[in-house]
Image (tube, coloured by chain):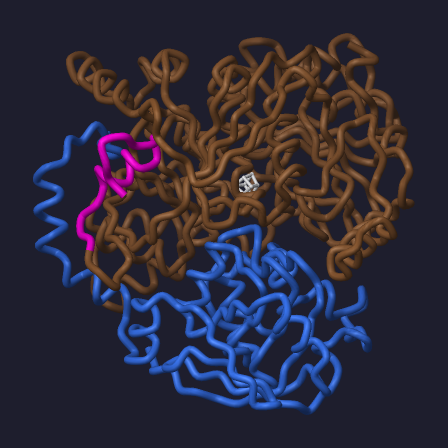
Amino acid sequence: MTPFIAFESRVVPMPNNNIDTDQIIPARFLKTTSKEGLDKNLFCDWRYNADGSPKEDFILNTPRGQNAQVLLAGDNFGCGSSREHAPWALTQFGFRAVISTSFADIFKQNALKNSLIPIVVSPEVHAKLFTLPEDAKVHVDLASQTLTLPDGEKVEFPVDSFSKTCLLEGIDELGWILKQAPAIEAYEATRVSTLNTLG
Amino acid sequence: MSGSVRTLSQKVWDSHLVREEAGAPSLLYIDLHLVHEVTSPQAFSGLRARGLKVRRPDLTVATTDHSIPTTDRSLPILDPIAANQVAQLDKNCKEFGIPHYGVHSEHQGIVHVIGPELGFTQPGMTVVCGDSHTATHGAFGALAFGIGTSEVENVLATQCLLQRPSQTFKVHVDGTLRPGITAKDIILAFCAKVGIGGGTGTVLEYTGAAIRALDMEGRMTVCNMSIEAGARAGMIAPDDTTFQYLHGRPFSPKGADWDAAVARWKRLPTDDGARFDREVSIDGDSLEPMITWGTNPGMGVSISGAVPEPSSISDPLERDAVAKALSYMGLEAGKPILGRPVNVVFIGSCTNSRITDLRAAAAVLKGRKVNPNVRVMVVPGSMEVKRQAIAEGLPELFREAGCDYREPGCSMCIAMNGDQLQPGEYSVSTSNRNFEGRQGKGGRTFLASPLTAAAAALTGVVTDVRTIL
Ligand code: SF4
């Protein structure tokens, strides 16, 4: 995993509450066996007309939706299915952070594993971000857990320290768990097993 | 989290802690890992890339359910992308030594249906699956989470999951459900009460007389939709109903192991005086049939109710959300939901495709004909459910009523396999999600119980089942 570096970006506003993972990447695109190529179907049903042409008024099809790395969404972003295809599609499109007042639990964990930072802000900051002019930029710094607004206001956001270390140092989570093998073996030696799926 | 007085979820959590360390999430041991074709291919590729094996194939089990057609199983899968995904799971399971109840298995079915019915799911276990409705297994007093594909890879490789503790949230449902009211109405009422994000960061425990009175299928229906309130998991303490259900299942403990297991399971229920971080109560006596009107499962009303008026909502984003949902659904603000015309009725999914669900729908449809304007699909949850239904003569009953009775799978719950709504069509569905496009691009979903779905099948409009029982 590549270490996470601070960045500056314009903000793409999507003022919908409860954006679910079926909207982020509809289920019919989950028949793939790869992680790649999901960006073209990100928000597919909001983004394209029935004939496949882009819907002109959808934010990702406007200049404001291009080449920006921060998505600003309504409350409870990423609810619904556990599909990790959602953060894959968002990061492939170029997003590196999503700002909301809250995130669904599974989405949040999936996002952090893919270097997509879920930034939780207060309703006040959230409302203020939606009033930003189109070309205004925010600065995202994971190390100090701060989001800096164009007017210089610094907003701290929570990230659990383990995920933060993994992201900043490029530590891979599975590698870390594999190193706990002795503890896992010790646990297995104590457990009463009532199951054998092999028969 | 441990202490002398603990909740059910805390007990299961404590007994699965492999390692706790300040600054890191807890390392939790997983007793049962369920796998399906959609969220696993990239995880197996990851294992291969690192040269890793599956640590505990004996605690892992796979089935194929999401991408497969619900038509004749002897025919090949026509969609080449779906066929490839299904073949991948077969190949991965063979290569890594995982038992797989594939398309041609006599035990194939929706992952959350076969886990319990084969006896894999047991009280006190930790259960995970790359699927948000893993919460279903909490009906047995298991701590069951949906996980992402990276976590699927982690569990395949190590049998462990990194988890942060959740808050505990007690959902107390008192009273006795009146005729026509089901487990589905309890959970739709809860989702409507707290909203789609209302349970975020919590593990629910459902308690109270109305929950105790439910059979295991009903308890699974309730726990299944815990995620629709945003909860990590939903649990019900095991009791005699649980033990009776599990006794004699193919993978349940046998003989002396059974007795020892039951003795352990009896220690799981929440201790008297244990504290929950949050609590809410629902009056089971006054529940009515519930139905959703909007584009998330929290947007529900009782069947005699009206859809909301956006103008009465003060929060601008929330007002906007309701207005958008009404516009997508083609519904007029403030109007009753009863009498809305319906094009499709779908009876199936891991929420309501078990034998008791089919029996409930059949009781309404028996000797009657479905409305000619409605396409009615009945999709059993598993081959086991299918066999039981045949033994009870249900397929003939459904077919005589004019229903399309199909082979087991997820089907129109997620519309990955060609079973889908056309743009603009309305369905009454017994599934768990009414998100935009969930049942087909442009499709509009009313979520309800099998009874309410069967009533709509007969009349062609949203109907209060109590008027035709
Ligand atoms: S039936 Fe629906 S909710 Fe259940 S596992 Fe299948 S797709 Fe998911």
Look at chain B in the picture and name its colour: brown
- Report if residue B378 lies within the magenta region: no
Q: Residue at x 47, y 22 (%)?
A: B384
Q: Residue at x 37, y 16 (%)?
A: B239
Q: Quadrant of the C terminus of chain B?
A: top right
Residue B245 lies, with reference to residue A183, above or below; the image says: above
Q: Quadrant of the N terminus of chain B?
A: top left
- Report if residue B12 lies within the magenta region: yes
Residue A70 lies, with reference to residue B283, above or below; the image says: below
Residue A69 lies, with reference to residue A84, above or below; the image says: below
Residue B429 lies, with reference to residue A176, above or below; the image says: above
| B48 relative position to A8: left or right | left
* Chain blue in the figure, letter: A
Across and down, in percent, residue A171 comes to 27, 74
Q: Nearer the viewer, residue B414 or B432?
A: B432
Across and down, in percent, residue B350 comes to 54, 34
What's drawn in magenta, residue-wise? B1-20
Q: Residue at x 33, y 29 (%)?
A: B120
